[in-house]
Image: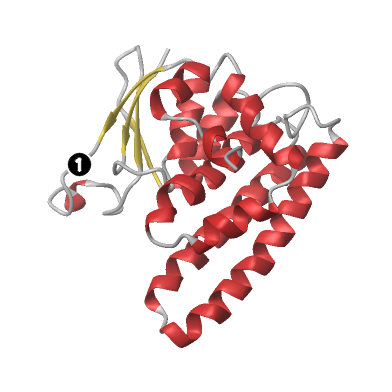
Amino acid sequence: MASYIFRYFEAISLGETIRLLLTAAKVDWTEECPEWPKEKPNQPFGRLPVLIERSADGSPDFVLSESSTIERYLARTYGFLPMDPRGAAVQEQLRDRQIDMIMSFRGHSTVSDSAKEEAYAKFEGLLDKMIRIHTDILRENGNTGYSFGSKLSYTDMAMYSFMKMFFVQLVQYSEKVPRLFKAKLTPELVKLVTTLEADPLLSAYVSQRGSLATYVLQE
């Protein structure tokens, strides 16, 4: 079986879904945090994350960059995306929307104070739509805590990571958005969090890295 080296910063951001996928896949993997920007020229596209797959047969390393590409490669390889192209596309579009929102939020720090309220209002509209869509998906699946079927999927791990970034990481930059997010959380999304954290594939990882449930359940 292949083993992996995952290179990224010590942050949740665009790395946490990859960490969850590697853990849930039960593969041998280690993480490296390159000295930045010193190591920038040594990465395929001069950016992180980077995934290095090492084959057991000694064949050349397979190296990937770009977070979405890495996520989907791992999700397909280890069965967290369906084989059916349409089913896979449904999950991929949900993740693409999350990435767009992350990039939108990052832009808030570069706008003037007078433009921040407009930026927050735009983000709130995107958040409302995302929560509504994902809550409907969870309800249609019987409110089991899983988004599709009866087991962990790419969508579950991506949504968990998305929420964790806002509740745990980005709160240091703005408390407004985590408060906004928490006020809009539905019982279905809270159940997704608790279900993922209790899943045997990820429970040990969550215990080591810290629980998101402590944030979303906190009064």
Compare residues 177 and 79 and report the one nearer the observer. 177
**Residue 82 appears in which quarter of the rendering?**
top right
In the rendered image, which quarter contains the C terminus? top right
In the rendered image, which quarter contains the N terminus? top left
Q: Kindly state the secondary structure of the residue where label 1 is placed.
A: loop
Compare residues 30 and 12 and report the one nearer the observer. 12
> Residue 99 location in percent, x, y?
54, 55
Q: Residue at x 29, y 48 (%)?
A: 44
> Residue 200 location in percent, x, y?
58, 13
Q: Which residue is most to the bottom?
A: 114
> Residue 108 location in percent, x, y?
45, 72
The residue where tag 1 is placed is 34
Q: Is residue 192 left or right of residue 174?
A: right
Q: Is residue 56 left or right of residue 129?
A: left
User: In the displayed structure, would residue 194 be above or below residue 204?
Assistant: below
Q: Residue at x 76, y 32 (%)?
A: 148
Three-letter residue code for mark 1: Pro
User: In the displayed structure, would residue 144 be above or below residue 183?
Assistant: above
